[in-house]
Amino acid sequence: MEFTAGGRLEVRVTAADVGKRVSVRRRTDAAERGGGFTDTVGVLTSWDDGVLLITRRTGESVRIAEDTLVAGKVVPAAPARRRGPAASYEELARVSARAWQPVESEPLGDWELRAAAGFTRRANSALPLGDPGRPLDEALGEVRKWYGARGLPAYVQTATGAEGTQETLCAELVARGWEREVSAELHIGALAPVGDLDADGTGVELSRSCDEGWLRRYGRTGTPGPHVRKVLASGPSVWFASVPGSGDAPAAIGRCVVDGRWAGFMAVEVDPGRRRQGLATSVMSALARQALSEGASAAWLQVENGNDGARALYGGMGFAAHHTYHHYRHGRA
């Protein structure tokens, strides 16, 4: 990474650049012993009392003492994508929210409060897509009150790593005692290549609803109540895929929501005894062909941090990370 101007290292960032994406180089402890520097890239979320706070695309915040800086500069808000459809964070946030709708919701300015009796964090968190219409502390108080009235923990869903994401809000939440509980990446890719992966698709059954067997293979909840079925059935055009198995649950399942040009893939699960047989690919391919027939051309899906198997599978299908999203929780149960 080039920091020089006329052959000299320069610090070309100041406190006035808070909110911008920066790249800085600083001395480490090893530098005091004759060498050792490290680079940090992310959004400069604060610069107070001689300490910089930089939030990386992963959501991790790094504190850097001002007197350790040797170079720094403002860099483009987001790196240019090398592949996949063009998309903004806000577009994807709204599309993914429509594909996993809560049982009840209420606006808080441009934020949305969402609840579904505790079924998944996505359906039970505040989604901030703009101005809450009041000071942040007041807004967060409203969030806590709204979820408390429902006997639910208060969560705020945020995102980092793309133009228009919420690194500054993440830092503000941490400063107020909210804890990042889980993170995942939203990946995007072209849809047609996914449909071509298994053009035959023999054995994959598509339905507009999920039966008891599908829910058993899904396994993300205990006895599924009506709130679970309502969330799973939500979205503009919802499809469920199943590959029949030998027991009381399918060998593989998947869910797809078609919404304009986008097809979102969720709940792709395979019987542990049938893995590495291409069933996940067959499910994805069958759902992709259905979405293509409805006019979709782009695809998205979510991968939790640490799920290297899924990351490798979807990377082979042409998906790449667009941004990372997080759930911040207030307090502990």
Image: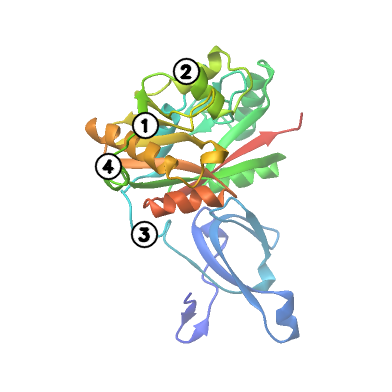
Q: Secondary structure at mark 2?
A: loop
Q: Where's residue 265, x and y in %?
A: 41, 36
Q: CA distance from mark 1 to mark 4?
A: 11 Å
Q: Is residue 45 above or below residue 29?
A: above
Number of the front mark, 2 or 3: 2
Mark 4 and mark 1 in contact (Cβ < 8 Å)?
no
Q: Which residue is mark 2?
A: 211
Where residue 18 sits, quadrant-wise, is: bottom right
Which of the two residues, 159 or 69, is positioned nearer the viewer here? 159
Label 3 – label 4 distance at C-alpha? 32 Å
Label drawn at residue 204: 1
Q: Earlier in the sequence, mark 1 or mark 4?
A: 4
Which residue is label 4 attached to?
A: 199
Q: CA gap, disc 2 to disc 3?
A: 43 Å
Looking at numbered disc 1 in the image, what kind of residue is underneath it? Val
Q: Amino acid at mark 4?
A: Ala
- 19 on left or right of 150: left
